[in-house]
Image: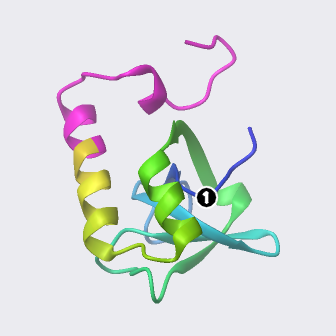
Amino acid sequence: MDMESGQVVKSLAGRDQGTLYLIIGFEGNRALVANGRSHTVKKPKKKNLKHLQPYRCVVPEIKERIRQGNLSDSAVRNTLNMIISAEKGQNHPCCLRTSSSKGC
């Protein structure tokens, strides 16, 4: 599955294993990811694409804000909090499931 800006991903390796992020850009073969707290929009974390598990969820509002250049940490935090609360409630909409060969 190809990854794109505005997509939700989970870290598979490193100290931050299991952490959800939003992709806010790319630099070579690395994704620039932010969670709005420890890794802000101004100082995103660079993660190897092989160390990220993509979710099917691409947030259109975040993608548009990235394109316009006005993405804020609060928007990133709010989006990730919404996704985390949906996961904890086991209320998985199709886009929140990790990629699989079965489809929706």
Residue 26 rendering spot, x and y as whole percentages: 70, 71
Mark 1: secondary structure: loop
Magenta residues, as a range?
Answer: 83-104
Q: Is residue 101 magenta?
A: yes
Q: Quadrant of residue 88?
A: top left
Residue occupying the point 45% across, 88% down: 42
- Residue flagged by tag 1: what amino acid is it? Ser
Residue occupying the point 34% across, 75% down: 72
Give the quarter of the figure containing the N terminus: top right
User: How did the renderer colour the structure?
Assistant: rainbow
Residue 63 rendering spot, x and y as whole percentages: 53, 56
Give the quarter of the figure containing the C terminus: top right
The answer to whether 6 is drawn above or below residue 14 in the figure is above
Q: Is residue 1 left or right of residue 65?
A: right
Q: How many marks?
A: 1
Q: Is residue 69 magenta?
A: no
Residue 19 rendering spot, x and y as whole percentages: 39, 58
Q: Is residue 68 left or right of residue 26?
A: left
The answer to whether 96 is drawn above or below residue 75 in the figure is above
Badge 1 local density, few (<14 within 10 Å), some, or many (20+)?
many
Q: Is residue 78 left or right of residue 71?
A: left
The residue indicated by pointer 1 is 5
Residue occupying the point 25% across, 70% down: 74
Q: Quadrant of residue 23?
A: bottom right
Given the current orientation, which residue lies at the most extreme right position?
28
Given the current orientation, which residue lies at the most extreme bottom position?
43
Residue 30 rendering spot, x and y as whole percentages: 72, 71
Q: Is residue 18 left or right of residue 11?
A: left
